[in-house]
Image (tube, coloured by chain):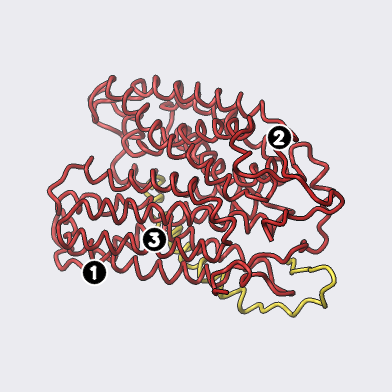
Chain colours: A yellow, B red
Amino acid sequence: MSTAHTPGAQAPVKVSVSKLAVAWALVGLPLGYGVFQTLTRVAALFG
Amino acid sequence: MSWLDRERTIAPPGFNRWLVPPAALAVHLCIGQAYATSVYKTALVKHFGASLTEIGVIFSIAIVMLGLSAAAMGTWVDRSGPRKAMFTSAVFWSGGFLIGSLGIFTHQLWLVYLGYGVVGGIGLGIGYISPVSTLIKWFPDRPGLATGMAIMGFGGGALIASPVSTALLKLYDPNSGAKDWVASGDAVGKLFLTLAVVYLAYMLFGAFTIKVPAAGWQPAGFDPAKVKAAKLVTTENVSAKNAVKSRQFWLVWIALFCNVTAGIGILEQAAPMIQDFFRKSDGVSLVSAAVAAGFVGLLSIGNMAGRFAWSATSDVTGRKRIYMVYLGVGAVLYTVLALAGSTTTVLYVALAFVIISFYGGGFATVPAYLRDLFGTFQVGAIHGRLLTAWSAAGVAGPLIVNAFLDAQGKPGQLDAASYQPALLTMVALLVVGFLANLRVKPVDARFHEPRPDRGRAHEPAMEA
């Protein structure tokens, strides 16, 4: 994963993995729910 | 200096750029609700005693306002920065639901037009373009992947809103267990209030999280020389004012218009179309309503997946080549659909799925295409102006399809052959779009912004 690199700056601060995980979970979980719900409808196409 | 100002959003050293896509997704997942309005359409028809057309106008106003506000506010979005833009979008989008709920509770349809349509539509337009230029700056090595992730959210928003809205309507309406239940207006009004609060919270999370890269920032290991080497990727910048004067802008506009019109051709009619394609001689369709609904769901997945997958692929193939696939391969698939789509349901579904994935891919790839042609200086503003192609397609697509189908017969009596004129017209449109895309070349240097120091690759002072 790339982190910020500013010319002349000090070495980058350690990335907060938990902050990254929370941010992606906040959008990923609802999206996963929506995809799952849609796939249950799609199942009728193949049933 | 306000918390919303661009200067307050400059990322500190060590900021992980992978925090930016979820911030963008948070906004797009919320405004993507616009494609889930069919959940409460019947309820509003009953509540207001209005026709389907009168209720359908709510969505049409919103989409027209999306295009107009994206075009009108694009320069302001680029200048003000993503946080102020996302915040503004949140206020308008949420406010649209609040005003709309007032219209529902007081039985005033015009207030719903004003609320969801006009105010919400402005939120749609600003929200749609708000994270785009920021994502492109954070991911100069893969702008297609970055914008694909965000714009995938617009497709995904409806996948979330549809089941959630249905569940909330059942919760708010004590009669939800009744046979042939249609939600009450009171339930829809409460749904609007709930969505206003939830979407405001999510979009503010996006506004709070978004950051812009510091001047001169680039990803570790990124080699700008590799980007320069591609013929259609400029190292110059073009203002929005000059971009719309260039031939390239209008060629891409035509390509997007044709791609979107062709996609809408299927999307607008997806459920009845599959039933008509497989209608027996006695007039009964082999495809039930439940299966047709499943087909619509599959197309939604294809739309969303195409936004991410094709746009990410364009980082490897280049934007012009991927548009040649959308339009050229799309034309071939449409032809097969028109002439042989009723052969088997597997073939029909596969063709429609890929065509709709190209529809989504076209939307998601176009910001990166604009970045390649016009640079990052005002790519958000240029994108906003280009989205008028979406508004135009939103009118043209249904008009073309419905006009041809009305001439063929009544709903419920059509078959596969009835769709041939409409589908072959879409083929012609895709060929036009393909030819327009083929003519895209680097933008003439007379449109470039002057650079005070031609030795450094940095943004013009206006952007700092």
Give me the disc on residue B407: none
Residue marked by disc 1: B171
Give me the disc on residue B92: 3
> Could you tell me how far apart the alpha carbons at marks 3 and 1 are, in whole angstroms?
26 Å
Q: Residues within 10 Å of mark 3 (few under 14, many from 20)?
A: many
At horizontal 54% and vertical 35% (from top left) the residue drawn is B256
Q: Amino acid at mark 3?
A: Phe
Chain of the residue under label 2: B
Q: Secondary structure at mark 2?
A: loop
Q: Are marks 3 and 1 on the same chain?
A: yes
Q: Amino acid at mark 2?
A: Val
Query: Which mark is nearer the camera, 1 or 2?
Result: 2
Q: Residues within 10 Å of mark 2 (few under 14, many from 20)?
A: many
Give whichever of A7, B159 is nearer the camera.
A7
Chain of the residue under label 3: B
Residue marked by disc 2: B443
Q: State the image coordinates of residue B29 (x, y, percent, origin top left).
A: 46, 59
Q: Earlier in the sequence, mark 2 or mark 3?
A: 3
Q: Earlier in the sequence, mark 3 or mark 1?
A: 3
Q: Circles 2 and 3: CB distance less than 8 Å?
A: no
Q: Please state if B384 lies on the left or on the right of B93 as rendered.
A: right
Q: Secondary structure at mark 3?
A: helix
